[in-house]
Image (spheres, rainbow, N blue to C red):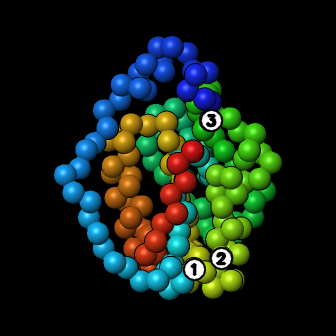
Amino acid sequence: MARLKDIPAGEREMLMNLPLPSFDSTPFVKGRLLSERRVAILSTAALQTRSDRTFARGDASYRVIPGQTQPNDIIMSHASVNFDRSGFQQDYNVCFPLDRLRELAAEGVIGSVADYHYTVSGANPPERLEGTARQIAGLMKRDGVDAALLIPV
């Protein structure tokens, strides 16, 4: 990802002036131990398997990455010219830490790794992704996921 200082002035100003939500309270829910949770990944790096369609500019849909997908079958189609792909090209775990989740499950730190994981293109305003987020939440629920590792890229 480009540093803010390296982004053209007009785009930088637009990003700095985006409205952010404010909340009157912070909900607190005490859940199960992490060692009992089923964890899925949700990344904003616009990743997909080689057989999926690529993310187009303004695409607010999602892609499903099956848990058994091999690293060399995961590609990135993020449309932003400001997006630095070098970390992903060296190690896909930077944007999609599936290997790390598998290690944590093997060590008993987390209960299990979900069968499916999800990616969106983070180059969208949050309100455009709200419907997508609800769809992903439903899919995670069906997969028994009770914890999501959010990877904002």
Type of amino acid under label 2: Leu
Looking at this view, is 5 or 153 the one in front? 5
Where is mark 1, residue-wise? 110
Cβ atoms under marks 1 and 2 closer than 8 Å: yes
| Residue 14, horizontal then vertical, whole percent | 41, 21
Residue under the point 46% across and 83% down = 33
Q: Residues within 10 Å of mark 3 (few under 14, many from 20)?
A: few
Quarter of the image that includes the N terminus: top right
Q: How far apart are marks 1 and 3 (CA)?
A: 29 Å
Where is mark 3, residue-wise? 1
What label does residue 104 carry, if any? 2
Type of amino acid under label 1: Ile
Q: How far apart are marks 3 and 2 (CA)?
A: 27 Å
Q: Is residue 66 above or below residue 47?
A: below
Q: In this view, does 20 lie above or below 113?
A: above
Type of amino acid under label 3: Met
Q: In this view, does 75 lie above or below 81?
A: below
| Residue 115, horizontal then vertical, whole percent | 57, 74
* Residue farthest to the left, as pictured: 24
Q: Can residue 1 be seen in this view?
A: yes
- Going from N to C along the chain, the mark reached first, 3 or 2, is 3
Quarter of the image that includes the C terminus: top right
